[in-house]
Amino acid sequence: MTATIIDGKAFAATVRARVATHVAALKSDHDLTPGLAVVLVGEDPASQVYVRNKGKQTAEAGMASFEHKLDVATSQKDILSLVDQLNADPEVHGILVQLPLPDHVDSAEVINRISPAKDVDGFHISNVGLLGTGQKSMVPCTPLGCLMMLRDHHGSLSGLNAVVVGRSNIVGKPMAQLLLGESCTVTIAHSRTKDLADVCRGADILVAAVGRPEMVPGDWVKPGATVIDVGVNRIPHPEKPGKTKLVGDVDFASASAVAGAITPVPGGVGPMTIACLLANTVTACCRANGLPEPEGLTA
Ligand code: GUN
């Protein structure tokens, strides 16, 4: 079997187009412009690239983008007071504090200071609890993107066996909650799971989110399964000395020969994450103004 490639880049473009349509309607019908504030503390090069891309795509969707770049030595108190200011700003509907924060900063306190209604990352403890109890929440962007792709590919996911490899708060745990919400039978596996290969072989839907390059080989994949590869790992290029190559947590060559469908790296889950951040900002704006949830942009 040769797997269908789930094209995250193309799908993310359709999500962004949906976002732009909602934004245009919010402007014309309600004189509202959804606004996203991004806070970056320090000069981590990868974070700077992410923040630049977020700002660019926010503006392209017709939304307001507010960037706050703080010195690496900014105190906890000053970061919290910026969050307080953004919480109170009616033009800001979504707030994202780029992680990781410098070592002297208590990240949990900063995240939990964000108003849950503006927490477009879905990391606030209230949103984590709401998702865990099946209530309306802000859903973390990467798992939301994975869910959108799975729904698009499968329609109903009810009754399918889903295995999520990875138990992070940002991807693994919320992904499992979302799949449970779709009536999948869900297993969360991780590096200590016994017989991990066998557990993976039982999956109709296999989500790999461990951060280990090409850890899942094709013979862990059930024939016909759908494989979602969340990994983004940079490895030395096998053919070009001195160069690097981006790979996922799944060995694409062997897995794509067995799976029914698979997301590539790059061009799979990655582009969906920022698209879902924009979607969450529109959702937050609608909720803040008592308007109906935007169709096709929520979990
Ligand atoms: N750093 C890497 N990914 C993310 C993310 O999804 N949200 C935030 N806030 N920081 C990140």
Image (cartoon, rainbow, N blue to C red):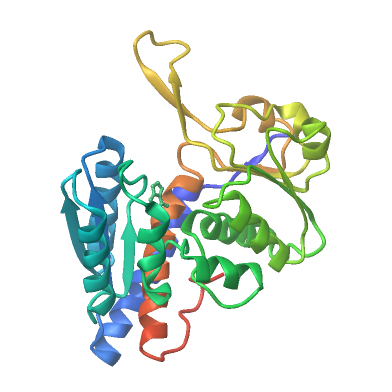
286, above or below 205, in the image: below
- How many marks the image carries: the answer is 0
The reply to whether residue 223 is visible in this rendering is no
The reply to whether residue 78 is visible in this rendering is yes
Which one is nearer the viewer's eye here, 4 or 37? 37
Quarter of the image that includes the N terminus: top right
Q: Residue at x 68, y 31 (%)?
A: 255
Q: Residue at x 44, y 53 (%)?
A: 273
Q: Quadrant of residue 158?
A: bottom right
Q: Looking at the picture, how far across and down is residue 207, in whole percent?
A: 65, 45
258, above or below 182, in the image: above
Q: Residue at x 24, y 82 (%)?
A: 90
Q: Looking at the picture, how far across and down is residue 225, in whole percent?
A: 75, 44
Q: Is residue 183 left or right of residue 233?
A: right
Q: Quadrant of residue 253?
A: top right
Which one is nearer the viewer's eye here, 45 or 33? 45
Q: Looking at the picture, how far across and down is residue 235, in whole percent?
A: 45, 21
280, above or below 107, in the image: below
Quarter of the image that includes the C terminus: bottom right
Q: Is residue 284 left or right of residue 188?
A: left
Q: Looking at the picture, how far across and down is residue 243, in whole percent?
A: 35, 16
